[in-house]
Image (spheres, rainbow, N blue to C red):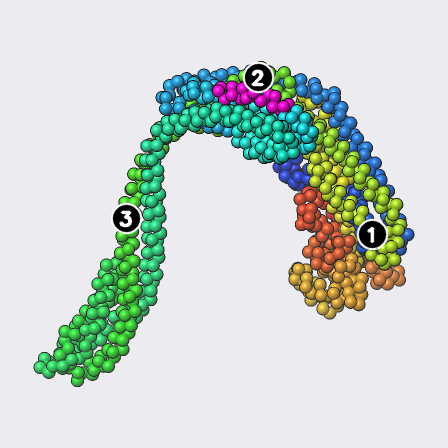
Amino acid sequence: MFKVHPIRHIIIIAVIIVVLFPVLWIFTTSIRRDNSSISPNLFSNQTTWQNYIDLIFEKPNVPLLYNDIANIYSLGSPYNKMNDKEILNVLNGDFNAYENYFKSTYRMSNSITSNASWISVNFIPKAKSLAIENVKENSNADLRYISIVSSDLAAKFNSLDQNYKMAGILDLLNSLKSSPDQDTIRIVGQYFPEIPQSWDNYKNSMSKAASALSNVPGNVSEILLESGVDNQMAKDLVSAYEETLNSLKNGTFTYGNWFAPIYLRRINMDTINLSNTIGSTSAAKLQNIKSMVFSTVQNVNSAFSSYDRSLSDAISKAQSSKTLLLSTLQSSLTVLSNNYNQLQNKLNTLTASSVSYLSAMSYDASQISIFSNNIVPTAMALDNMVSLVKSVLHQSKLSTQSGIFYDVSSYISQAKDWIAISSKYSIFDPITEQVQKILDDLNYIQNNQSVIYANLNSNAILNVKTSLPFVLLKLQSGLSMSIPVLQNYDTNAQKYKEASEQIPDVRKQLEEVSSEIGPIQEKINSINDKISIASLYFETLKSAKKIDEEAKNINSFKNADVFLNELNKYYAILQNSNIYSQLPPMPSSSRYDQFFNTQKLIDTVNLTLQTGNNLNKFTDEYSYYISNLKNRSKDYVNINVLGFPFSVNEINSINNLYQNQYVSIIGPNLGIISRRTNELADLPYFKEISGKLNSINDTSYYITQIWMQKYIPPLMRWLLNSIIVSGTAAVITVFLSALMAYPFSRLRFRGRKYGLIGILLIQMFPTMMAMVALYLLLNFIGKFLPFLGLNTLGGLTFLYIGGGIAFNSWLIKGFFDTIPMELEEAAMVDGATRYQTFWRIILPLSAPVLAVTMILGFIGNYGDYILASIVMTGLNNYTFAVGLQTFSTGAYSSNWGLMTTAALIGMIPILALFLSLQKFIVGGLTQGSVKG
């Protein structure tokens, strides 16, 4: 009965998942359409085998066919080595491929157009109705929310002072400057009644002007016709009067847009020019009409100026109210902010200065430490000399002889100056102590000049006098060089002290200013919040009425769109408001996803129909050029083959057409269609058309595969190169290794032991160390044997053979040692030679180890990149590993789908080799590893 080990099983399963996950990722990435290496979904619902088809069959699409044809007409390689019949055969093959692609394009273009038309006719009306119902159902929740917000804002608004209300209406007043709106004028009229009054006067003046000028275009036209004038200028004059009349009728008239472009440049100039070509009576009539129109329009402009003044006065009053609320606090805040910034700058300056002074002091201290190397030995030597002098004087008798032993007063002065500074700072205490000893000794000498001089006959004192100048010279050197540095240290220390003492005061002032700024800023924020309440209240009055009106008119898709646009505008205003967090939570916008996705569906269907038509026109034009090329290809090729340069303009025309139409318009549109249809097909309310959407998605993708620029490398050639090189090298290496291992296993000869050690030593050095030598070797051999040179499969095979013999020989020798020698002896007794025993007995018995060495050698050579990339430089000579690297560093480095597909295809030879030789692997690896 088997024992259950759940933890062990869990660990094994986890390890298997971790090990196999990279393979799963590679596979799923290789069949993704989006070529994405990082995605939240491991398994995509858009998959394709196109990458495998491209890499295995290497079938060129339209751009690749174009490149091939362009290369043919320019007689590029390899066509420069072909005759005219061979070139024409290739061209005919390309033209046939073009015709097949054109047929496929027409078929697929008609397919997406047909599906889009069906959706447009049979589904979109139903989808619109459902979307409209969706908007109607959910609009009530928005209306309730707006009602709640209105009530909430109204309660807060009513509690505000008049100044806050006036400040809050400022945004509405400013909006009237750019776009007058009747609802807005009605709202602001509650506080500024002169605005709606002046606006009504302005509208009435436009209406009166329109009535007064209603016959002007007809009268002008009649005058000109009576005068026999019917030219473009006459038509332009009538048109100018009609535009003036229409703008007055529909209430869109503005004096600024009328005076210069219409009156001065058209009415005035046309009237003047036409008056010179007609009779005086008719000219007078035209001038009178012009004057009457100008006078009437001036009345309208006067009414508008009155409205504009009332609006400007209202804006001024509202701005004054806002300024009154904020000006004092804002001024105080500005002053405090300036003070804060000044103090902060001062603190930064003091801090930086302190750091600078400390750095300078540290440097000076290190210099003084260096100078102490002269001072300390001097102190010791001088102290010993004074001790000698004291011992002599203590033993001698007093003398009345007077004289100067050695004047050290200048040195005493220097020592005092040094101590006066250094004693202030504890860092110099050790040196100061030594200088103080020097000062004491110098004072002793200076104070006892006569006594010491009287004992000059003493050898000790005489010796002191002889050596003292040298000691004092070194002392002077140390003190004179260190005193300026010490003074500089003292200066920096004083400045550092001053800066350090100011920093706490500045920080305290900063804290005080900051504490004053906080409350003022809170008051300003509170005022701004109240102004925002008032402003949002007025905006809600304006928007709520519009939204409510639009909600009642949701009876068409267009009206539903207008309603949602107004709703989104209002919600955007709420979200950008200062008090948004104080409002009730807003309803989710995802409730209208069905409407917006229906809108996206309509746009996608229209884009598909347009793209299908554009694609057919593009294909027609493209096929026209190809047809011309096909008909003229024989003549074009013959002229080129005869050596006469011949420019084929159709090639340039095709390229311009492709770039201007497909690359710029059709290709991007197909990408948009594919992406949108994929998104829309997954929505539950589009389940009925999911099949057609998926069909459009797939067809759009395959159209792009025909027409898009592609990189299709010669992967199968690279695989074949790797198999040839790795297989040949593995077979030859195994054979040579077996020949080498046999004598080391069976024969006893001088140098056998050191030969085995030499093989081990060779194996210790990596091949990387010999890269330059191997390159030079192949370069040299290639001069005499080209098939073994650089950029040749033979040369790379040659290097692989030499690199694997040492390791394989050891492995095979170990296996040979396990084969009983009696088998060979029996064969030799029967008359077999040593070679026959090796070939007919040893090798057959060694099949497991030979298979293992062959597998290891094949895998190692197959996956090698460094050596192969150095030797191989031609694209067609690349091995699989070198070619695979081009996917990640070339122009298509982001094409993960193609790269992972190539990696999976490249696994097939290794898997095939393992499966075919797996029965030898275990035995070959274990046998020969132990003795006996």
Query: Real-space Cα distance between discs 3 and 2?
Result: 68 Å
Callout 3: SS: helix
Q: Residue furthest front?
A: 280
Q: Is residue 903 magenta?
A: no
Classify residue 597 as left or right of residue 743.
left
Type of the residue with mark 2: Ala
Disc 2 crowd rating (10 Å Cα; few below 14, some 14-19, many 20+) is: many
Q: Mark 2 — residue?
A: 551
Of labels 3 and 1, earlier in sequence is: 1
Classify residue 194 as left or right of residue 344.
right
Write down the quadrant of residue 482 in the picture: bottom left
Q: Position of residue 441 (x, y in %)?
A: 19, 71
Q: Position of residue 587 (x, y in %)?
A: 53, 21
Q: Is residue 522 visible?
A: no
Classify residue 507 as left or right of residue 402.
right
Residue stretch in magenta: 200-219
Type of the residue with mark 3: Gln
